[in-house]
Image (cartoon, helix red, strand yellow):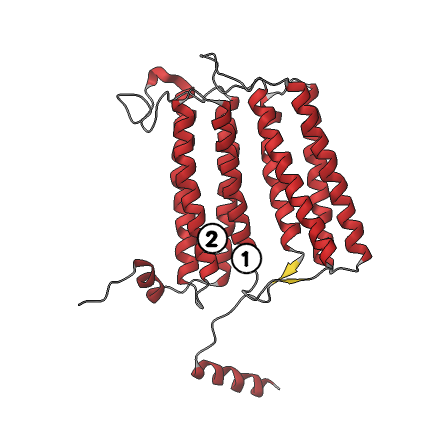
Amino acid sequence: MPKTLNPLQLVADRWQPSARFVERAALACVVMSVIIVVTGGAVRLTQSGLGCPTWPTCTEDSLTPTPAMGINGVIEFTNRMLTYVLCAVVGVAIVAARARAPRRRSLTRLGWAQFWIVASNGIIGGITVLTGLNPYIVAAHFLAATSLLTVATIMWLRTREGDDEPRDVVARPVRQLGWVLVVASALLIVAGTVVTGSGRHAGDASKDVHRIPLDWHEVTQLHVDFVYIVVGLTVALWFALRAVKSPEGPRRKVVELFVVIMLQGAIGYVQYFNDSPEVVVGAHMLGSCLMWIAVLRVFLSLRERGEAPVLPAPAGEHEALQTAAASSR
């Protein structure tokens, strides 16, 4: 009975990507994950959430927007098409991680996790349209996109390290403080989705879109409270890292996180005191992504997993390198 051939194995037999290519492919997934969040925000902020009033087609009779739908239909449909670009980028990352030798199953699993999140979020996006921009589904749509960004960021950072068992580079209480920072930051993002769901940018101006029945100002205050908590935890973590004389890497990443939080906070205040102008809200969504990436970088820097594995050189090549090194002495 003929042996079943795995298409990914066939690619691996004929193509050996460099470690740099795999890392850049993973980074491209991070970039596309941010782009899909920002463009999704643009759909809502331009009142184009129902630019295509149904799903998976744009109208009952057309896959693409019609001229009568105007710019809103184009914006909504373009955001849908970007999902396919995202799938293509994730596909390249999966193939590159699978073809790279020695094979690292952890990277391919992270790649496939991204694929299934994209597919699931596409369905959630369709439900969002079919439910007339239900704010709870919209929030789930954004949180799923944040989950994609999380997995993409982890994959990118994992391409730069090995597969050894994680070893803490700081004392356990400091590592636990890092966990608390991650949880607080996640709650901050969730609170931000509630602010969005109760705020004035419903996503479509042509219909009476349901909003979360909460006082927007009170929810915003809760969101700000979480900002203060995250800032306090970030400062506390920096002092803790200095106290235990941690490596320079984690301390530098904490400083980078603090800068991102300060910039994001400034954007948030401008947004609040100017009645949430669309451009500023879009910048705030971008800042949310950058802050979450910075948080993950801080957390993962508190442990190490050795050097990234490399493919041993063939015997003949190894001998040639030794001869060249000896002749250069």
Q: Are marks 2 and 1 in contact (CB under 8 Å)?
A: yes
How would you rate the neighbour count of disc 1 (Cα within 10 Å): few for under 14, some for 14-19, many for 20 or more?
some
Q: Is residue 253 visible?
A: no
Out of 80 and 185, give the one closest to the viewer.
Answer: 185
Q: Position of residue 73 (x, y in %)?
A: 39, 22
Residue corresponding to mark 1: 158
Q: Quadrant of the C terminus?
A: bottom right
Q: Is residue 29 left or right of residue 264?
A: left
Q: Real-space Cα distance between discs 2 and 1?
A: 9 Å
Which three-letter amino acid code belongs to the residue tagged 2?
A: Leu
Q: Is residue 19 visible?
A: yes
Kindly identify which numbered label has been placed on residue 329. none
Q: Position of residue 170 (x, y in %)?
A: 72, 59
Residue corresponding to mark 2: 110
Which three-letter amino acid code belongs to the residue tagged 1?
A: Arg
Residue 195 placement: quadrant:
top right
Q: Residue at x 68, y 40 (%)?
A: 260
Q: How many numbered discs sit on the rendered protein? A: 2
Q: Secondary structure at mark 1?
A: helix
Q: Secondary structure at mark 2?
A: helix
How would you rate the neighbour count of disc 2 (Cα within 10 Å): few for under 14, some for 14-19, many for 20 or more?
many
Q: Position of residue 289 (x, y in %)?
A: 58, 39
Q: Position of residue 154 (x, y in %)?
A: 55, 51
- Compare marks 2 and 1 and give the one earlier in the sequence: 2
